[in-house]
Amino acid sequence: MRRITLSLDDNLADQFDQWAERHGYENRSEAFRDLLRGRLENERIDDGRASHCVATVSYVYNHHERQLASRLAENQHDHHGLSMATMHVHLDHDNCLETMALRGPLQRVREFGESLIAERGVRHGYLHLVPVALEISRVMGEPHMHVSPTS
């Protein structure tokens, strides 16, 4: 591990310390590493250097909305190769929350996640992409994909 030194004006340092405390960091180093790691991951996504990712997509929808549950399920079945797991929660009589864990080529995962969020009747949605490095090995003679964080 390499040690670096940063100089910040007092106001920025105070804001950073308050942010780190609000988010439960025990020290500045961990807080800074997470901020930097997130910024670098976003840059890899934005400039096209990230080819694969893991992701979560979460959305809230009214299950009484005409044919919405069927359209969402059909879209999920059409993209079954990207989906690892789905959690479905009944929030109240009308509204449901679904969160899906996804993995695969970043652009395909992004398009799929955004298509779920954009579906007419979905009230709230959020897609979180995390770039990963791929390692292909053989498990019991079959190709097996390992993913690891890029930073």
Image: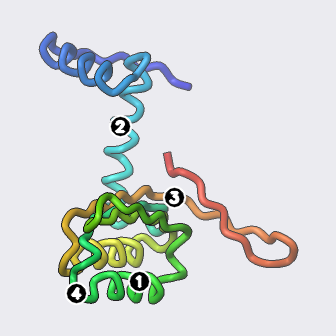
Disc 4 from disc 3: Cα separation: 37 Å
**Label 4 vs 2, first from the N-terminus:** 2
Q: Which residue is mark 4?
A: 66
Q: Which residue is mark 2?
A: 36
Three-letter amino acid code at the position of disc 2 = Leu
Three-letter amino acid code at the position of disc 1 = Ala
* Residue at screen point 22% across, 87% down: 66
Residue depth check, mark 4 versus mark 3: number of the one nearer the observer: 4
Tag 1, which secondary structure?
A: helix
* Residue at screen point 40% across, 41% down: 37
- Residue contact at pointers 3 and 1, CB within 8 angstroms: no
Residue 39 appears at what percent x and percent y? 31, 44
Q: Which residue is mark 1?
A: 73
Tag 3, which secondary structure?
A: strand
**Label 2 vs 1, first from the N-terminus:** 2
Q: Which residue is mark 3?
A: 132
